[in-house]
């Protein structure tokens, strides 16, 4: 498909969120086009490393009009399967996608509507749906520039597999979902691994007989009716929590929970936050114990009461909490010598920053988030879908995009058949 000069609706992004909105647009007879910078369909999953697997079960990869019907709903898809599923969804709904089209600028037109300047030329639209997700630009801390030149510094966005790394030990900086899963991969390959532990919490793989994502879906879908909703962005005690890391969890090996204390007991060296490089020496914060304790409390503080109350009010017969606490306390290390430890690679699993710099409209808050309510921005005709904390913590996940899309479609007047 070629890029038209003008159209009713432009969807920027052809991943899960953009394609879901295309499904609603088509059924309302809305003339539209999806623009995607990539050369092939598959969404952001194409950017993950070779051994990546979904953290949420396969059943969460169900899109409107395209439910998961495979043989293993409770297994965890590898990267190529989930990317292929997104591409198949585009084919299933005959989505009007123009690939290799990057949007450089989005601005309002003097006569109304919007103009998008793209790598394939300009296009005018009455309305625009931004569906570019919440993970835009790899983020590394300022101290990365002081890494010794002999050491390879690599962000997880560019990591593909353990075999491509130089021989030697690896320092992983960041303990959210990507960090702990890559750490597992490195350990299984026989690498000696050091992990700088940050503020990410952890959740159990299964709680009271069901996968964590089962309860997350229930809270997102039925929590309002039962008085147990997932907290919305406006209810957070600190707006900075919108940038908090995803909790430890893994889809590898059939899916399991991650407990960093167990890794430490089995030989992985855990460290506090990385403060600075001083030549070959790494200065570390004395916060390992505090960070592990916070990770241990995370589920109980954020989710346990909500889930237990939901179970009670919904009249669900669920087994009791059978989690077992691990009390191993690793030593606190204040300094690390990279050369002495044989560390040849530093992997930055430090997440992403928002980058809406291409949107030339004054609609962003002090943290770079678009000001919006359930996808409706302050600018009439400009919408968002799949953004971090668009509504609640589920919004940028496979579980939440569908629910947010239905809410946005209703507000846009897109009727579901």
Image (cartoon, rainbow, N blue to C red):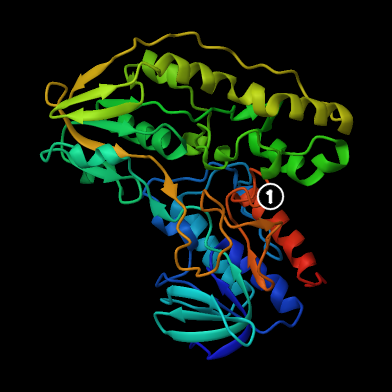
Residue 68 appears in the figure: no
Task: Name the residue carrying label 1.
Answer: 391
Q: Position of residue 301 (x, y in %)?
A: 65, 23
Q: Is residue 78 rendered to the left or right of residue 343? A: right
Identify the residue at image location x=40%, y=18%: 287
Specify the quadrant of the image occupied by residue 355: bottom left
Q: Is residue 317 rendered to the left or right of residue 209? A: right
Identify the residue at image location x=21%, y=46%: 164
Q: Is residue 353 rendered to the left or right of residue 382? A: left
Q: Position of residue 106 (x, y in %)?
A: 51, 74
Residue furthest bottom as drawn: 5
Residue closest to the eye, 213 or 287? 287
Residue 303 drawn above or below residue 381: above
The image quadrant where one finds the C terminus is: bottom right
Q: Is residue 69 rendered to the left or right of residue 119? A: right
Residue closest to the eye, 274 or 248? 274
Q: Where is residue 269 in the image (x, y as percent from the top left)?
A: 31, 19
Identify the residue at image location x=49%, y=27%: 258
Q: How many labels does the image show?
A: 1
Residue 200 appears in the figure: yes
Q: Where is residue 59 in the image (x, y as percent from the top left)?
A: 65, 49
Q: Is mark 1 on a helix, strand or loop?
A: loop
Residue 121 drawn above or below residue 377: below
Q: Answer few, some or many: residues within 10 Å of disc 1's Cα (few below 14, many 20 plus, some between 14 and 19).
A: many
Specify the quadrant of the image occupied by residue 407: bottom right
């Amino acid at each position: 498909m070629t890029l038209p000069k003008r159209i009713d609706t432009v969807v920027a992004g052809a991943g899960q969120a953009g394609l879901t909105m295309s499904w609603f647009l088509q059924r309302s007879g809305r003339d539209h086009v999806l623009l995607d910078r990539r050369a092939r369909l598959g969404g952001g999953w194409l950017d993950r490393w070779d051994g990546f697997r979904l953290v949420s079960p396969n059943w969460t990869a169900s899109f409107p009009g395209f439910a998961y019907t495979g043989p293993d709903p409770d297994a965890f898809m590898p990267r190529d399967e989930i990317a292929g599923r997104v591409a198949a969804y585009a084919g299933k709904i005959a989505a009007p996608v123009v690939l290799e089209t990057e949007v450089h600028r989005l601005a309002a037109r003097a006569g109304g509507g919007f103009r998008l300047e793209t790598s394939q030329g300009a296009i005018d639209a009455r309305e625009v749906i931004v569906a570019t997700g919440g993970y835009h630009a790899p983020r590394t801390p300022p101290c990365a520039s002081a890494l010794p030149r002999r050491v390879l510094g690599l962000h997880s966005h560019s990591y593909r597999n353990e075999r491509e790394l130089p021989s030697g030990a690896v320092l992983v900086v960041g303990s959210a979902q990507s960090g702990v899963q890559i750490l597992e991969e490195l350990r299984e390959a026989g690498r000696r691994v050091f992990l700088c532990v940050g503020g990410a919490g952890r959740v159990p793989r299964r709680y009271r007989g069901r996968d964590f994502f089962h309860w997350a879906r229930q809270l997102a879908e039925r929590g309002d009716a039962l008085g147990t909703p997932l907290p919305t962005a406006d209810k957070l005690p600190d707006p900075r929590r919108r940038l908090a890391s995803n909790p430890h969890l893994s889809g590898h090996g059939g899916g399991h929970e991650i407990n960093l204390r167990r890794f430490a007991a089995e030989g992985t060296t855990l460290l506090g936050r990385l403060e600075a490089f001083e030549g070959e020496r790494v200065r570390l914060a004395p916060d390992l114990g505090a960070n592990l304790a916070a990770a241990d409390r995370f589920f109980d503080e954020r989710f346990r009461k909500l889930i237990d109350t939901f179970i009670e009010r919904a009249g669900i017969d669920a087994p009791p909490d059978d989690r077992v606490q691990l009390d191993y306390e690793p030593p606190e290390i204040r300094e690390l010598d990279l050369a002495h430890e044989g560390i040849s690679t530093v992997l930055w699993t430090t997440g992403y920053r928002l980058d809406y710099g291409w949107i030339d409209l004054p609609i962003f808050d002090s943290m770079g988030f678009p000001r919006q309510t359930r996808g409706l921005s302050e600018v009439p005709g400009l919408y968002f879908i799949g953004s971090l904390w668009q509504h609640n913590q589920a919004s940028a996940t496979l579980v939440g995009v569908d629910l947010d899309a239905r809410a946005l479609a209703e507000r846009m007047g897109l009727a579901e058949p």
